[in-house]
Image (cartoon, rainbow, N blue to C red):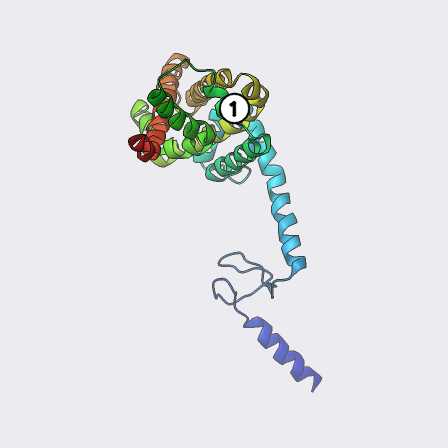
Amino acid sequence: MGASKAEVGTSATSTRSCLNCGRVLQGAYCSECGQAASVGRLSLRQVIDDLFSEFSSWDSRLPRTLRRLTVDPGGLCRDYVAGQRVGYVAPLRYLLLALALSVLSNWWLDFDPATVMAAGPALSARQQAVRDSVATLVLEHLDWMVLLALPLVVLSLRLLYRHSGRNLAEIAAFLMYVQGHLLVLSLLLWPLKLSLPMAAIALRAMLQWWLLARAGKAFFRVGALAASWRGLLATVCAYLAMLLAAVAISLPTLLAS
């Protein structure tokens, strides 16, 4: 009787299906999707285990990505699009993580755009209302404007580097890494942003230019001068795109004033 129970148990185990894709399981992990065979009802312990597992997987990739983007941003982008991806945080995920950190820092430090606009030149009441509406939107949501401007900057880089052989997807990955690292490095500008906000904005624009030029030199395999002027044009394009997005969003307010 005992033997027959064992046989039944073995038969039942061998015909279990993956809960994710439905494939018959033949080991500890599904050969189709990689999910563990031991997945059961969700418990608090499993949630905690998954959290620590996710953190440990980021623990090595995130510092490696940060270090490489600081030392050799163009080289990392070149290696990533060439297929060396396991050791690094994906570009979109890196950009979203950097954006979350930047938004959190804005909330925590309670940045007030009025401190920037108060230092501006005297204007008429209508001009001041227009300026305040657009400037407040840009300064409060500058990091989100980066996402809105991304497609236009990708297209501008595709045009500027049209003979590089890079396609739109590769250029988008390059730009997401660069823009994400710009957000990370911009966190170092917070002391200046609180005391001299206009200087911080100007320095951020210069930092973006420097990153685009430095990374572009290695990624697109061009000379320093060619990467420099292309990076400058792409930076100008990015800020114009952010300004256009701000004007478009605040247009109802402008028309009503």
Q: Secondary structure at mark 1?
A: loop
Viewer-proximal residue, 127 or 104?
127
**Extreme residue toward the right, this view:** 2
Q: Which residue is painted at 58% across and 37% down in the image?
A: 61
Q: Nearer the viewer, residue 203 or 182?
A: 203
**Taking 256 as reference, is 234 above or below it?**
above
**Quadrant of res 131:** top left
Residue 190: x and y in percent read 57, 23
Q: Is residue 52 above or below residue 14?
A: above
Q: Amino acid at mark 1?
A: Asp
Q: Image point 52% across, 59% down: which residue?
A: 31
Residue 117 as seen in the image, left or right of residue 249: right
Work out whether residue 123 or residue 191 is closer to the camera in this orientation and state it. Answer: 123
Image quadrant containing the N terminus: bottom right
- Can you identify the residue that label 1 sits on? 72
Q: Residue furthest bottom?
A: 1
Count of numbered badges drawn on the protein: 1
Mark 1 surroundings: few (<14), some (14-19) or many (≥20) residues within 10 A = some
The residue shown at (58%, 63%) is: 37
Q: Position of residue 58 (x, y in %)?
A: 60, 41
Q: Nearer the viewer, residue 230 or 34?
A: 230
For residue 70, side relative to residue 245 (left or right): right
**Is there any visible trace of residue 167 in the rendered image?**
no
Which of the 4 image quarters holds residue 3?
bottom right
Residue 203, compared with residue 111, is above or below; it is above
State the residue at coordinates (53%, 24%).
186
Residue 204 at x, y percent in the picture = 48, 20
**141 horizontally vs 102: left or right:** left
Quadrant of the image for the C terminus?
Answer: top left
Answer whether residue 112 is visible to the viewer in this image.
yes
